[in-house]
Image (cartoon, helix red, strand yellow):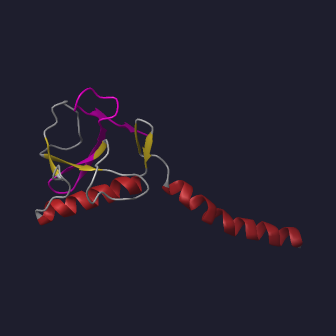
Amino acid sequence: MHAFKALVALALAVPVLTSPLLRRQCAETCGSTCYSQDDINAAVQQGYGYYEQGTTVGSDKYPHQYEDYEGFTFPDAGPYYEFPILSDEEVYTGGSPGADRVIFTGDGTYEGVITHTGASGNDFLQCTAD
């Protein structure tokens, strides 16, 4: 009987233990930084919110149009906008934007993640979808 109770208690605890792990699975990796889908969604939502309001944040005025000089292939046609992405579901509200950006369209559709990490000059590289 005690073994059954212990098994039930363990079974109930497993979803609680695995839920944060599932949330933190990498959807995109930029250099050595892993971004979960929650991180991506939070950055797109924040950036698109500023875009819809016609406001910007930070000295580089994010979000701003991304010209795609590198010639990346995104799922949808542009114009595209870039906005800093931070890990652990933190959202950019000003200050240093870091090296990584989410790309979205004018209707808020997520297109990809790009990074300055490993790129020459002020260029970008596409991050790796996991």
**Residue extending furthest right?**
1
Q: Is residue 75 above or below residue 120?
A: below
Question: Which stretch appears magenta?
Answer: 102-130
Residue sitting at 30 percent across and 56 percent down? 43
Q: Position of residue 8 (x, y in %)?
A: 75, 70
Q: Is residue 119 left or right of residue 70?
A: right
Quarter of the picture holding the C terminus: top left
Q: Is residue 45 left or right of residue 6?
A: left
Q: Is residue 108 above or below residue 71?
A: below
Residue sitting at 23 percent across and 39 percent down? 74
Q: Position of residue 7 (x, y in %)?
A: 79, 66
The answer to which quarter of the image holds residue 71 is: top left
Front residue of this view, candidates 88 and 113: 88
Q: Is residue 3 above or below residue 33?
A: below
Front residue of this view, candidates 51 and 95: 95
Q: Position of residue 114 (x, y in %)?
A: 29, 39
Front residue of this view, candidates 117 and 102: 117
Residue sitting at 43 percent across and 51 percent down? 36
Check residue 5 for magenta coloring. Answer: no
Residue sitting at 23 percent across and 31 percent down? 123
Q: Position of residue 51 (x, y in %)?
A: 15, 59
Check residue 111 for magenta coloring. Answer: yes
> How many labels, in total?
0
Quarter of the picture holding the N terminus: bottom right
